[in-house]
Amino acid sequence: MMNKSEKTAMLEAAGAPAEIEGRSLWRDARIRLFRNKAAVGSMIILGIITLLAIFAPLLSPYAYDQIDWGYIQEGPNWENGHIFGTDGNGRDLFIRVLYGARVSLAVGLLATSVSLAIGVTYGAVAGYFGGKVDNIMMRFVDVLYSLPFMFFVIMLMVVFGRNIFLIFVALGAVEWLTMARIVRGQTLSLRRREFIEAAHATGVSNFKIIFRHIIPNVLGPVIVYMTLTIPQVILTESFLSFLGLGVQEPLTSWGVLISEGAKVIEASTWMLIYPALFLALTLFCFNFIGDGLRDALDPKDR
Amino acid sequence: MTAITAHKPKKATSPILSVRDLKVHFSVPGKGLFAPDRKLRAVDGVNFDLYPGETLGVVGESGCGKSTLGRAILQLIPPSSGQVAWLGKDIVGAPHREMQPLRRDLQIIFQDPLASLNPRMTIGEIIAEPLVTHKPELGKDEIKVRVKRMMARVGLLPQMINRYPHEFSGGQCQRIGIARAMILEPKLIVCDEPVSALDVSIQAQIVNLLQELQREFDLSLIFISHDLSIVRHICHRIMVLYLGNVMELADRDSIYAAPRHPYTKALISAVPIPDPEIERNKERIVLTGDLPSPLSPPSGCVFRTRCPFAQDKCATASPTLDRVSETQEVACHFHDSIS
């Protein structure tokens, strides 16, 4: 024993060797994720869709609200530049699908981030303090759970008027509940772990224990759940738009486009097929990534 | 284990820690919907003093309250009543603000070496955490220097500083745990079965490391264990717990040479001796029955249900710790007649 520490002392005196870079659990997970072909393919496709959405105005000679009087409700045609065809008002469907992607992806990401921020903090606090605090906080979640979602959205619309921002709020307000429950459950099992006790014994504050020790350790399931929440939110937004509670014309989302396409499914199939294809593709990709992440973050659970 | 290497602590006048009538009771929901809560007496009136540089062994079977006692001393579990005086000042129920500066003198090492390290942090961050918490004025470089120095001291290669706990073996993880506990140079470390989860060869290394550190920093240790050979090797005094009560508290030499309490006798006679001749012929006291539930401990002496010498008096009066010699205290009504 003494020899060993002498040896290390000697090693140091002889010019300390370079520090060895450790392999964190995150890095392990990343390596496993990138070995998963379905997940990598999905990330590439999602990346392309995102880039298309971001650079939408540069990709088409038409604007999303510009009416081309010569081609009203015409099928896809490469010669006149309406590669996805036009809708009933003569607007280019390609650019409208990309603008729809902007709204749908933004709703998905924003609402999910809101639910992430609130849900993780709320769940971690409830689970960490436990007892009465936990009881009160989780009963509050139960109450919110029992609120009918559609009723909630319609109420918001009535009070504040139709507004894209409200959709973020409404979706975020509902999605964080499940997140909070997941994080609370994980935290309950973590808080009795010895490294949390060690932090206590050292006198680390509760706030720091939650953010330094608990949250990084619950992030695995949270990330998986997040990738599954994004498509759910996109779907809900489409559903709301389909019902006419979503975004306002001339702005559009995939839900609105699908709803318009569904009305004319017999006369102009392309108006349904293209937005539906994009929506389905996006949802598939998110689900594949979620699967890949779950396998990567918890290799024992395959 | 025959080599007796625990060094003699310097004769100190005043204890750094004195525990008086410490009780930890948990309330357990009663059976049935409206049944009243029941009391689980995990630690039920423990008294002892601990001197600087001394190692106190706490032994007893599973569920006798050893770990709870260790945590209650550090105020990780709030004691129900009693006194824990640290350097003469009672710290039971002390507010967070008063407790905070004391935390740098009181540390703990756990049984499961891997579970006691946050898997998402590098060991550099883990060992540095007490420093960052208590000495925020230190710069990043200074912290790193101190962490590396401590790593070398506990026998870890300092260039491993950026590695993660899962990249180390159990023994190395325990060294990391010790480095984290030692980085603030505390005065007391509660070792909660620090070697039970390790290989025998590694156990010896860790125990020797603890002894070296104790000598170097004049540490006091509370060494919780159920391995009597290791306790004998490292401890100066030994406290035998049974169902949250102290059965015997004595010097290592007196307790191994002449245990006075029937429970201690049984424990010590169960330790195998590495000589088949002696082992075959030695007198063994075999206890029958199981540990009674701490929810409803026996009346009087808690050990009476399993004690081969129990008499009527044991059921009615609970024995107090009697001083039988300068170095030995026993809680038994009949310690004179049975030894």
Image (cartoon, rainbow, N blue to C red):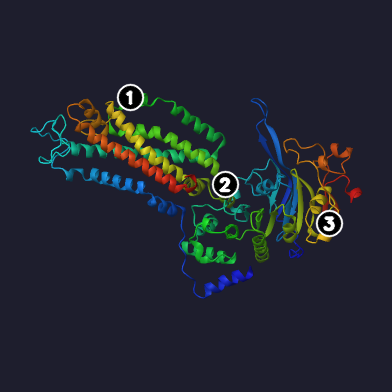
Instruction: Report the Cα–Cα distance between label 1 and label 2.
Output: 45 Å
The residue lying toward the viewer, choosing from B152 and B186, is: B152
In the figure, is residue B305 to the left or right of B222?
right
Tell me, yes or no, whether dots 2 and 3 are on the same chain. Answer: no
Disc 2 chain ID: A
Which label is found at residue A46?
none
The crowding category of the residue bearing disc 2, from other C-alpha atoms within 10 Å (few below 14, some 14 to 19, many at least 20), is some
Look at the picture and state if B138 lies above or below B261.
below
The crowding category of the residue bearing disc 3, from other C-alpha atoms within 10 Å (few below 14, some 14 to 19, many at least 20), is few
Instruction: Give the residue number, with chain letter if any, for mark 2.
Output: A193
The quarter of the picture where residue A83 lies is top left
The crowding category of the residue bearing disc 1, from other C-alpha atoms within 10 Å (few below 14, some 14 to 19, many at least 20), is some
In the figure, is residue B266 to the left or right of B67?
right
Disc 3 chain ID: B
Report the mark closest to the observer, 3 or 1. 3
Instruction: Report the Cα–Cα distance between label 3 and label 1.
Output: 85 Å
The residue lying toward the viewer, choosing from A51 and B201, is: B201
Give the amino acid type for the residue marked by disc 3 in the picture: Arg
Image quarter of the N terminus of chain A? bottom right
Q: Look at 80% across and 61% down and name the residue there.
A: B275
Give the amino acid type for the residue marked by disc 2 in the picture: Arg
Q: Secondary structure at mark 1?
A: helix
Which label is found at residue A154?
1
Where in the figure is residue A164, as x and y percent of width and height? Answer: 28, 33
Give the amino acid type for the residue marked by disc 1 in the picture: Ile
Report if residue A189 is visible in the image: yes
Where in the figure is residue B49, as x and y percent of width and height? Answer: 74, 53
In the figure, is residue A196 to the left or right of B258?
left
Where in the figure is residue B188, as x and y percent of width and height? Answer: 66, 56
Instruction: Give the residue number, with chain letter if any, for mark 3.
Output: B280
Report the mark closest to the observer, 2 or 3. 3
